[in-house]
Amino acid sequence: MRAPLVSFVVLNWRNEASTRGCIETILRQRRDVEKEIVVVDNESTAETRARLAGGRWRLIALDENRGFTGGMNAGAAATRGASSRCSTTICASPTTGWIAGSRR
C-alpha cells in the first residue's frame, strides 16, 4: 500500500536563501514518504521568482502581497496531499521520523 502524499506549503517573501533552506530541510526528510512542496511567492522580484521556478516544487507567484494568511491559504488551495503542513521560511531541522509521526 502506498503512503499518502504529504503536502508542504512554504511561504516566501523576499527571502530566497531561507526559502531554499526550508525546501532542502523538507526534501531531506524520510524518502519513503511522498512529498509535495508548494512554494508561494508573496510578491517578490521577478528575478527571485525566476530563480525559485523549476525546482522539485511547484511555485505559486502572487501578484500582490497577501500577507501570511493569504499566502498560506493560496498555497493550501493548490495542494493535492491527504495531509498538509504549512511552514514559514524559518524551518527547524526536525528528526527523520517527524513526517510519519505527524500523520497519525
Image: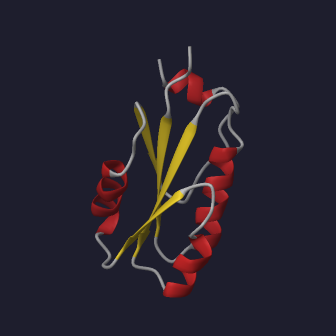
Estimate the x, y position of residue 94 in percent, counting from the top left.
Answer: 65, 38
Estimate the x, y position of residue 2 in percent, counting from the top left.
Answer: 56, 20
**Residue drawn at the location 62% of the way across and 55% of the way down:** 56
**Residue drawn at the location 33% of the way across and 79% of the way down:** 63
Horizontal relation, residue 69 to residue 19: left or right: left
Quadrant, the N terminus: top right
Residue lying farthest to the top in this orientation = 1
Residue lying farthest to the bottom in this orientation = 46
How many numbered dots are placed on residues in this image? 0
Residue 75 vs 51, above or below: the answer is above
**74 and 55: which one is in front?**
55
Estimate the x, y position of residue 101 in percent, counting from the top left.
Answer: 55, 22
**Residue drawn at the location 66% of the way across and 59% of the way down:** 21
Horizontal relation, residue 89 to residue 94: left or right: left
Q: Quadrant of residue 52?
A: bottom right
- Colouring chosen for the image of the structure: secondary structure
Residue 63 vs 5, above or below: the answer is below
**Residue drawn at the location 52% of the way across and 44% of the way down:** 36
Residue 54 vs 46, above or below: the answer is above
Q: In which quarter of the image is residue 50?
A: bottom right
**71 and 34: which one is in front?**
34
Horizontal relation, residue 77 to residue 79: left or right: left
Horizontal relation, residue 14 to residue 69: left or right: right
